[in-house]
Amino acid sequence: MWLDDPVYRLRSIVRMEMYRVAELGEWPSYIDVEKSLLGRVPTDEGTAPGFDAGIACCLDLIPEDKQKLSATLHAAYTQEAVEQVREEIKTFDPYSETTWWLAMSSVCRPGEVTEEQFLDQVKLAAFYAAHPGLLPVNAERMLKAMKERFVVRPDGVAYGTEMGAAQAAYIAGHDLTVEYNKTYGIYFIATFRESLGLEEFQWADGVDEKGLPTSGPVHGSRQFVKAATVKELKAALEIAKKHLGL
């Protein structure tokens, strides 16, 4: 019976709390809140991405007064949030928002998870929440793993092919990143600063099989753009580097 289903109960809590978390994190309007949070919880019909710090906020596994950073980073790496993380990883205070965010993020696993695996994740996160003295160790472990997601190119730009490479590079001190998406064969250029300085850049007008542009701003963003070719990437990067003073 569904009333005895623990994952169903957890989904219900996430459903009730997801808009509160989105509002707390001041998410951009184009973010699909339900897909971004509720969509992470598996069902008996299939797997899902599983637990992360955003889910931890919904389930109050992060204290309410420590949720702002995790809620923000779930949907946007703002300059204020990145600078806060850079400052707080200097000490890994067990009660800092960054330590909570990283420790709860350490519970994530690559790929999709089943309902049973999701429950195991929640139990582990609950254990960490009940023993905050363990948070710094897991936070440091997570930070180390994140830094392995990217390399620094000869031109000084952080580059990665894994999801999350750009965010990891921000935290490590890089203001400009490139992430190559192997599935779509396109490059993403990003910064957490106000702008890449590419507002007047002439992007190629190609489209993919769904009719979506393969070049240009993502959701109209000034901080996050995509380039379809290496030539276009190089040209855009030169402008972005100058704009950011790199």
Image: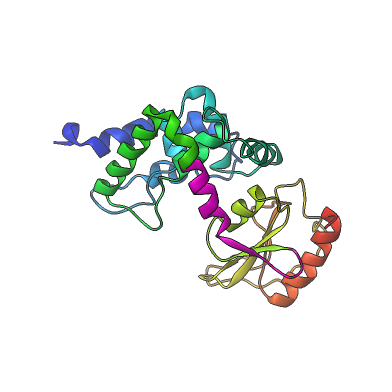
Residue placed farthest to the top in the image? Answer: 65
**How far across and down, in percent of the image, does residue 230 sit?**
70, 76
Q: Residue at x 58, y 55 (%)?
A: 147
Q: Quadrant of residue 29?
A: top right
* Magenta-span inclusion, residue 10: no
Q: Is residue 188 above or below residue 244?
A: below
67 or 107: which is nearer to us?
107
Q: Is residue 128 above or below residue 159?
A: above
- Quarter containing the N terminus: top left
By what rule are the colours in the image chosen?
A: rainbow
Q: Is residue 62 above or below residue 218?
A: above
Q: Which residues are magenta?
A: 138-156
Q: Is residue 57 above or below residue 146?
A: above
Residue 202 visible in this rendered orientation of the protein = no
**How far across and down, in percent of the image, does residue 98 sit?**
57, 36
**How far across and down, in percent of the image, does residue 115 sit?**
26, 47
Q: Residue at x 60, y 34 (%)?
A: 26
- Quarter containing the C terminus: bottom right
Q: Quadrant of residue 18?
A: top left
Q: Report the side of 203 relative to 6 (left or right).
A: right
Residue 127 visible in this rendered orientation of the protein = yes
Q: Report the side of 130 relative to 93 (left or right).
A: left
* Magenta-span inclusion, residue 151: yes
Q: Report the side of 147 relative to 135 (left or right).
A: right
Q: Residue at x 49, y 28 (%)?
A: 20
Q: Report the side of 96 relative to 113 (left or right).
A: right
Residue placed farthest to the left in the image? Answer: 1
Q: Residue at x 35, y 56 (%)?
A: 112
